[in-house]
Amino acid sequence: MAQGGSVAGPSYGVLAVKSNYGCIKEGSHSHHGLNYPDSFLADTFSKQRAHMIDERNRRNRLSRAIQTLQGLMPQMDAVGKQKKGPCKAITVERAIDYIIALQREVERLRKASSATTQDAGVLFDLDSTSNNAAKC
């Protein structure tokens, strides 16, 4: 074929618009000169079906995880009990904000606990020093 030229024929026009798979799916592949063994066709549709089932299962898992996440977040309880809760993106964004807030709270409590422990240590040292002084 010359550069820039076109291939004539009805089969090539259809294949330019549809993929080989599209022709196989609608059953017109043999009309366009696409000859595949039956085992190839069965395998192709089997793989497509398996992929479709796997993808549906993945979506269902993701939906259940999002619903669980909505139930675990306090600000989402009221929204989640409505007929239709917030979209998945909003749920994930709110979960991120909530986790960050919890991390900050944990850090604040650690600092407060550390300060309290240090204060208790100083009081304990003072108390033991005064008891020792009283014994002399």
Image (tube, rainbow, N blue to C red):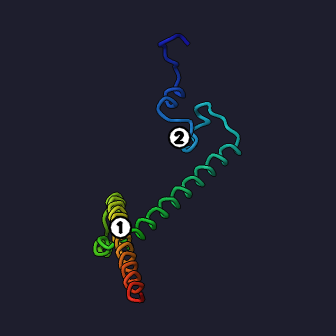
Query: Residue 98 occupies which quadrant of the picture?
Result: bottom left
Badge 2: residue crowd in 10 Å (few <14, some 14–19, many ≥20)? few
Q: Residue at image x 52%, y 35%?
A: 19
**Whole-number angstrom distance, CA of label 2 to CA of label 1:** 64 Å
**Quadrant, the C terminus:** bottom left
Which residue is at 40% across, 86% downward? 131
The residue nearer to you, when weighing 17 against 104, is 104
User: Quadrant of the rendered structure where residue 24 is?
Assistant: top right
- Which disc number belongs to residue 22? 2
Rendered location of residue 3, percent (x, y):
51, 11
Amino acid type, residue under disc 2 in the picture: Gly
Residues at marks 2 and 1 touching, judged by CB atoms closer than 8 Å: no
| Residue 11 rendering spot, x and y as whole percentages | 54, 28
The amino acid pointed to by label 1 is Lys
In this orientation, which residue lies closer to the viewer: 14 or 43? 43
Q: Position of residue 97 (x, y in %)?
A: 32, 61
Along the horizontal axis of the image, is 92 left or right of 52?
A: left
